[in-house]
């Protein structure tokens, strides 16, 4: 019988073999095969757990543990249980399972209790194998992959993905004065999950409005909720709703996208299936901003380290706020008194590159926003829920409108709207897709199966005109 445990490679736990043998010497555990410091420190913990459970520790013998293959550096949170079980099998204190392979992963306490490691959910699908969750006079074998904390070594419990949904509750709505115009914008962004840039004068409510949007997103699916909880455990943060990640503008690129000598995911992975809000976008370093271009498009980030290739999930809704001038008051069509030179203002807005700006599907200027009644915000939530139900009936509940492909939308145009769309000129293919996707969302809000002429017109005012106004600021 061969015993396997798991070590971390990127965002996965990969199996490796654990060999145990004995040789004369002082009673101790010697671990070879490039273990990290955490694994080396587990020696006393394993010895104490074995003795507390009533098993015998060898006298005048060393326990030699070899982690195969030996050329790979091992980093593991759940190797304790595998080594302890391998020793008990090798010493004959516990009958070994009648199997060719046994996969074991669990953390030991000093009293011998087994705990689920934080990264247990990152084990790849091993449904055809068995995981050992405890040892005693009768070793416990179970095919359950998802475990709760075990009160002792003999009580495995299962956790199904459907149970995760019980912990997800929509947060209380933050009350603020919102106009009918902003409610319309909020519904479009929340229903379609369209990446949006809010630009305008300082103090006009850009950040406050952006922080309101995550509360109106639809609940995550079971798969999304499970991924959110899995990632939140990795970051030691409990999530009860879709995550809202707001990194400070001084964050370095490696912390944003992930990496490092001991490869770790970044903030964009923490925002997976949630919202990444970049407040004061132009204050972020160019390297950090430009590194977001691939994850925005692909929904993941690829990192190569030491001839290995890692993939971290990063499918998020991108929201950003910014001023367009160092004084904070520069807006399209209006050049107020400013203590900075025109060249200084131009160099500031040049921090936002064309390719990154093109990744935003919607651009909204906050100086055009109007204040509204507090009662408006409460009624809008029910309307958004109704819109979600309509989208679900259309069979698109698993794909948000912001991710729809061109061929998925073209068949939903009316003849008149298609005629208008074909006459329009777009600066890039992304602008064209943005108008199509936002028009699809507006049609959903209006409970229309087909995209109409007026839907294209409204989408154009959000996805095309503001970007042209941005170019004319310094003309």
Image (cartoon, helix red, strand yellow):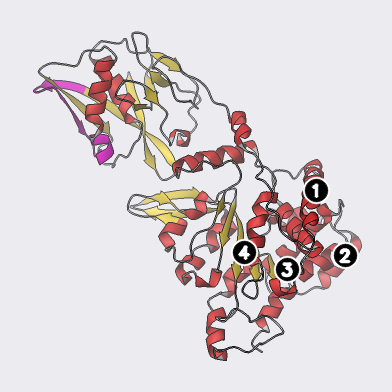
The answer to whether residue 3 is above or below residue 213 is above
Callout 3 touching callout 4 (CB < 8 Å)? no
Give me the residue at 44% from left, 21% from top.
Answer: 130
Callout 1: SS:
helix
Any part of residue 36 in sight: no
Q: Marks 1 and 3, how far apart in space?
A: 21 Å
**On the image, which quarter does residue 112 sit in?**
top left
Q: Which residue is mark 3?
A: 463
Q: Position of residue 445 (x, y in %)?
A: 82, 53
Q: Marks 2 and 4, how far apart in space?
A: 30 Å
Is the C terminus in the top left, top right, bottom left or bottom right quadrant?
bottom right
Is the N terminus in the top left, top right, bottom left or bottom right quadrant?
top left
Crowdedness of circle 2 by 10 Å Cα count: few (<14), some, many (20+)? some
Q: Which residue is mark 4?
A: 207
Q: Which residue is mark 1?
A: 387
Callout 2: SS:
helix
Q: Marks 3 and 4, how far apart in space?
A: 20 Å
Most foreground residue, 132 or 415: 132
Q: Which residue is mark 2?
A: 454
């Amino acid at each position: 019988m061969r015993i396997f445990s798991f070590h971390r490679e990127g965002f996965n736990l990969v199996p490796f073999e654990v060999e145990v043998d004995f040789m004369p010497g002082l009673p101790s555990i010697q671990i070879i095969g490039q273990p990290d410091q955490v694994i080396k420190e587990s020696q006393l913990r394993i010895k104490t757990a074995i003795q507390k459970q009533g098993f015998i520790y060898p006298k005048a013998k060393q326990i030699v543990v070899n982690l195969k293959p030996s050329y790979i550096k091992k980093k593991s949170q759940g190797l304790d249980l595998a080594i302890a079980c391998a020793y008990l099998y090798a010493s004959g204190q516990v009958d070994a399972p009648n199997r060719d392979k046994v996969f074991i992963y669990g953390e030991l306490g000093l009293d011998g209790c087994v705990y689920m490691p934080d990264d247990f959910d990152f084990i790849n699908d091993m449904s055809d194998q068995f995981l050992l969750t405890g040892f005693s006079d009768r070793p416990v074998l179970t095919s359950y992959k998802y475990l709760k904390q075990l009160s002792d070594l003999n009580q495995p419990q299962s956790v199904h993905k459907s149970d995760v949904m019980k912990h997800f509750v929509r947060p209380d709505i933050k009350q603020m004065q919102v106009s009918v115009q902003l409610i319309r914008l909020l519904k479009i962004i929340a229903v379609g999950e369209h990446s949006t840039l809010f630009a305008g004068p300082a103090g006009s409510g850009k950040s406050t409005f952006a922080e309101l949007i995550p509360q109106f997103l639809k609940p995550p699916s079971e798969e999304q909720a499970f991924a959110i909880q899995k990632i939140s455990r990795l970051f030691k943060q409990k999530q009860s709703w879709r995550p809202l990640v707001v990194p400070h503008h001084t964050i370095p690129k490696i912390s944003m996208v992930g990496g490092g000598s001991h490869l770790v995911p970044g903030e964009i992975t923490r925002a997976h299936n949630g919202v990444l809000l970049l407040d004061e976008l132009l204050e972020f370093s160019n390297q950090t901003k430009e590194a977001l271009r691939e994850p925005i498009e692909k929904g993941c980030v690829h990192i190569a380290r030491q001839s290995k290739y890692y993939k971290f999930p990063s499918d998020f809704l991108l929201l950003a706020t910014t001023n367009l001038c160092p004084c904070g008051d520069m807006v399209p069509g209006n050049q107020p008194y400013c203590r900075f030179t025109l060249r200084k203002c131009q160099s500031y807005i040049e921090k936002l590159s064309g390719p990154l700006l093109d990744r935003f599907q919607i651009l909204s200027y906050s100086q055009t926003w109007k204040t509204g009644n507090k009662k408006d915000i409460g009624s809008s939530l029910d309307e958004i829920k109704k819109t979600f139900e309509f989208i679900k009936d259309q069979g698109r509940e698993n794909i948000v409108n912001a991710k729809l492909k061109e061929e998925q939308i073209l068949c939903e145009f009316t003849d008149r709207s298609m005629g208008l769309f074909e006459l329009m000129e777009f600066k890039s293919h992304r602008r064209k897709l943005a108008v199509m996707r936002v028009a699809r969302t507006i049609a959903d809000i209006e409970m229309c199966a087909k995209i109409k002429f007026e839907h294209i017109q409204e989408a154009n005012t959000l996805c095309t005109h503001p970007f042209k106004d941005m170019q004319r600021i310094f003309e």
